[in-house]
Image (cartoon, rainbow, N blue to C red):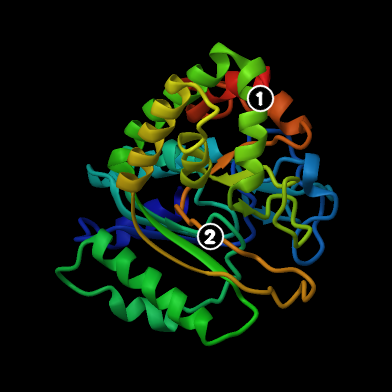
Amino acid sequence: SQFISDSLLRYPNPEQLIVVLVGHGSGWGANVMSGQPNPHIWPQPSGWGDQNGGMLWDDTPDNGTDASLSLSTAALGETMRLAGAQIGRPVDLLYLDACDMALAEVAYEVRGSVSHLLASPNVAWASFNFDNLLPDVTEGRTGAEIGDLWLESEAEFLNEHPGHPYTFSLIDLDKMNAVATAATGLADELLADMAASRPHIIDAHAASGKYDSNFDGKLDVNDSYTDLLDFAEHLQNNDAANTGVRTAAEEVVASVDEVVTKTAFSSGTPWPYPNDEWYWERYGGLGIYLPTARDEARRKAYYNAAYLAWAADTTWDEFLDVF
């Protein structure tokens, strides 16, 4: 917040306010005491599975301890609200150049204070491609237009570097409320008869595209970040599911199609994991928290209204709790 405030004092009334945050990321994160996540080793922290991460991990805090600090989802939202208040309008573009940040939980937190979000729901590779990105920031271009160009530039850069399968999304945050409404509708339908819904949820999750939430190099059922559109489409097309579930899933698909305005992705074998392939058949571009193979301590402790606006305003947390 201080960095943005100082920048705006030096350059007041900008035509466009674009914020780029670069660093380690791991999706949604709660406001917790220092010490989470664990001090990390490349490429991500050891034993991450039950830890809470956020983004911009700092293993060298000035508090005189060895504890790690990170920027929580709620703190990110507060920062963007302060920035928007200083210029009297939403931030035009927020680029979260970090892993696993194109999640519904993160996008919903910054809606209203940010117009467009550029992020990756999977590993982002931190290419530091800014010598190609910054020239796209020219007079007369909107934040959405710059985000569109940046997405293409990042994809083009990684296409030139084999071993870097990628996922990028440009998200129109003005439409995130519709996603929240649709997700609540689906959660409520699944909750109405969990005994009947459970096998459909498990099958849809298993068949859907995943994002590496536990940083083991594999995309499988043990990952708790799932492509929301792909998951909903599998429920929508499941003839064994009841009509209410299928109709609600259709609403989720439509809302995600609207909110994600541009995508770029490429499947392949990541160079740190030569024996694994990252493959996305139906890439919707917006992930969601959906642990099905096993429960997680962070869900039980932090995935609730006290830490996430998404959990406060939708019933996705109640759905996960009952599941």
Inter-mark Cα distance, 1 to 2: 23 Å
In the rendered image, the vertical position of residue 226 relative to residue 245, given as above or below: below
Quadrant of the snapshot with the C terminus: top right
Labelled disc at residue 198: 1
On the image, the x and y values in percent for residue 113 come to 33, 41
- Answer whether residue 164 is visible to the viewer in this image: yes
In the rendered image, the vertical position of residue 160 relative to residue 8, given as above or below: below
In the rendered image, the vertical position of residue 303 relative to residue 92, given as above or below: above
User: 155 or 150, which is in the foreground?
Assistant: 155
On the image, the x and y values in percent for residue 37 come to 76, 46
Q: Are marks 1 and 2 in contact (CB under 8 Å)?
A: no
On the image, the x and y values in percent for residue 238 come to 52, 35
Mark 1 surroundings within 10 Å by alpha-carbon count, few (fewer than 14), some (14 through 19), many (20 or more): some
- Give the residue at the far bottom of this rendering: 160
Mark 2 surroundings within 10 Å by alpha-carbon count, few (fewer than 14), some (14 through 19), many (20 or more): few
Label 1 vs 2, first from the N-terminus: 1
What residue is shown at x 23% (from left), y 44% (from top)?
A: 89
On the image, the x and y values in percent for residue 282 come to 49, 56
Label 2 sits on residue: 281
Labelled disc at residue 233: none
User: 170 or 7, which is in the foreground?
Assistant: 170
What residue is shown at x 79% (from left), y 34% (from top)?
A: 294
User: 229 or 312, which is in the foreground?
Assistant: 229
Element under label 1? helix
